[in-house]
């Protein structure tokens, strides 16, 4: 159902699974994902919290709760959720990237860069982390390093329009500074 984008049907299926087996953590997590795709963020958060209440060391649910918290503008809660996911699963590249993104939003740019770099060490072809690293390096005025990051992202995903655009802007700004 999730692949076919029949989210209402997916929600009903996950709810039925939970009715049959209330401690089915994966069903709670998938219900949260379906609610998030339906933009029912409070319900998504509740589903992730239910999964975590059943299985405290469910790293994916902590990461997903962080994503919803970020979308709800609860940035400190998002940081907390990502940090919990990383305590459980230290090499969780997506959580590192997500944590970096929230830290950037909180203007903690050096910490954001550190998390993006860790994510890239774990998954060298993680284009979103390479892109996020590039945009954060731009904010720090480290244009040469940002250009390298955008170029790596584009090498992996040549049709990455945002990375192409930011690479162009970085190169343009670099030519002005000489």
Image (cartoon, grey):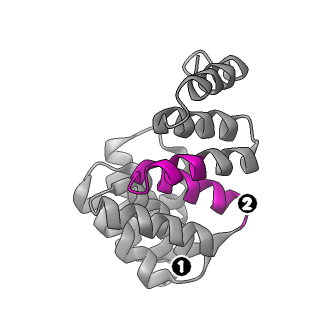
Residue 139's disc number: 1
Q: Is residue 174 visible?
A: yes
Dominant SS in magenta: helix
User: What's drawn in magenta, residue-wise?
Assistant: 48-73
The answer to if 59 sits in the magenta stretch is yes
Residue at image point 68% right, 17% down: 9
Q: Position of residue 173 (x, y in %)?
A: 53, 74
Q: Position of residue 45 (x, y in %)?
A: 66, 51
Residue contact at pointers 1 and 2, CB within 8 angstroms: no
Q: Which residue is mark 2?
A: 72
Badge 2 crowding class, 10 Å Cα cut-off, few under 14, some 14 to 19, many 20 or more, is: some
Lower sequence index among marks 1 and 2: 2
Q: Secondary structure at mark 1?
A: helix
Q: Position of residue 113 (x, y in %)?
A: 40, 75
* Snapshot quadrant of residue 18: top right
Q: Secondary structure at mark 2?
A: loop
Count how many numbered circles sit on residues in the image: 2
């Amino acid at each position: 159902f999730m692949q076919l984008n029949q989210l209402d049907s997916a929600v009903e299926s996950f709810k039925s699974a939970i009715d049959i087996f209330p401690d089915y953590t994966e069903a709670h997590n998938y219900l949260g994902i379906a609610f998030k795709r339906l933009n029912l963020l409070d319900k998504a958060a509740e589903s992730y919290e239910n999964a975590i209440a059943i299985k405290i060391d469910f790293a994916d649910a902590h990461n997903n709760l962080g994503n919803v918290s970020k979308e709800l503008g609860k940035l400190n809660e998002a940081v907390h959720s990502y940090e919990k996911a990383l305590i459980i699963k230290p090499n969780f590249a997506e959580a590192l990237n997500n944590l970096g993104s929230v830290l950037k939003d909180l203007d903690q740019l050096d910490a954001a860069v550190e998390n993006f770099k860790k994510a890239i060490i774990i998954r060298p072809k993680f284009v979103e982390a390479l892109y996020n690293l590039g945009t954060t390096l731009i904010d720090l005025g480290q244009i040469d390093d940002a250009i390298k990051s955008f170029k790596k992202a584009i090498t992996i995903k040549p049709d990455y329009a945002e990375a192409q655009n930011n690479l162009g802007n970085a190169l343009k700004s670099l030519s002005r500074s000489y």
